[in-house]
Amino acid sequence: MKFYVTYDCGFDENDGDECKENGTLYHPLKGGDWIVDDTSKDDMKLLAIISHYLDAKFGYDDDEETSNDDGEFVSDEEVIDKLLKDELLKKIGCTDDEIKKAVEEFDMHYYFPSVHSSMAEPHDYWFNIGIKPVSSERYSIDGIIKKAFKGNL
């Protein structure tokens, strides 16, 4: 099955005044809407790399769900070091070059909204990704009627 890779991201400006954005991610390597095929190992590897990249970039630890929310993100160098040691990425066959290339090409800052006010102090950043099916089958009314009465028409 094919899925769009979706996102929602944002930050708090001033005590609960959230700026947020959501939509479909662009493919980090090819451009255009990012669509993954769950039967493609390459698609699944890239999805895993970016998912783990975001967890590491925000400072989420495997043991503690604490984020570095003061506006400073973990450096890409630190993230790459962590991803190169990531057990799941290694088990599914992600190479060091694939990991480095994905991190180099994916720019999460492109997706964040602009602050609403020049007085804002953005903090409590988040960036979540998910998937939604590409095809939601649509049926015509006549098609359904004809199917129901196929022996009688």
Image: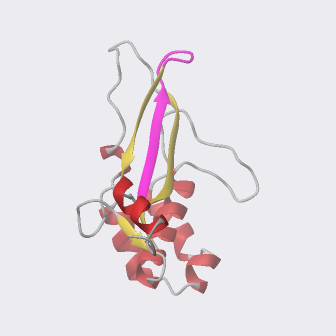
From the top left corner, tell me how far across and down residue 55 is, in percent.
57, 55
**Residue 153 located within the stretch drawn in magenta:** no
Here the colouring is secondary structure
Residue most extreme to the right? 63
The quadrant where residue 77 appears: bottom left
From the top left corner, tell me how far across and down residue 107 is, in percent.
33, 53
Residue most extreme to the left? 31
Can residue 94 be seen from the camera position used here?
Answer: yes
Q: Is most of the magenta stretch helix, strand or loop? A: strand
Please give left or right for residue 153 compared with residue 67 in the image: left
Nearer the observer, 8 or 139? 139
* Up-down relation of residue 87 to residue 93 (above or below): above
Can residue 135 be seen from the camera position used here?
Answer: no
Q: Residue at x 46, y 40 (%)?
A: 9
The quadrant where residue 99 appears: bottom left
Q: Residue at x 38, y 81 (%)?
A: 97
Q: How many marks?
A: 0
From the top left corner, tell me how far across and down residue 120 is, in percent.
41, 17
**Residue 11 located within the stretch drawn in magenta:** yes
Residue most extreme to the front? 152
Nearer the observer, 81 or 22? 22
Q: Residue at x 52, y 87 (%)?
A: 93
Please give left or right for residue 91 compared with residue 18 in the image: right
* Up-down relation of residue 59 to residue 89 (above or below): above
Q: Residue at x 36, y 62 (%)?
A: 143
What span is colored magenta in the figure?
4-17
Quarter in which the C terminus is drawn: bottom left
From the top left corner, tell me how far across and down residue 135 is, in percent.
39, 63
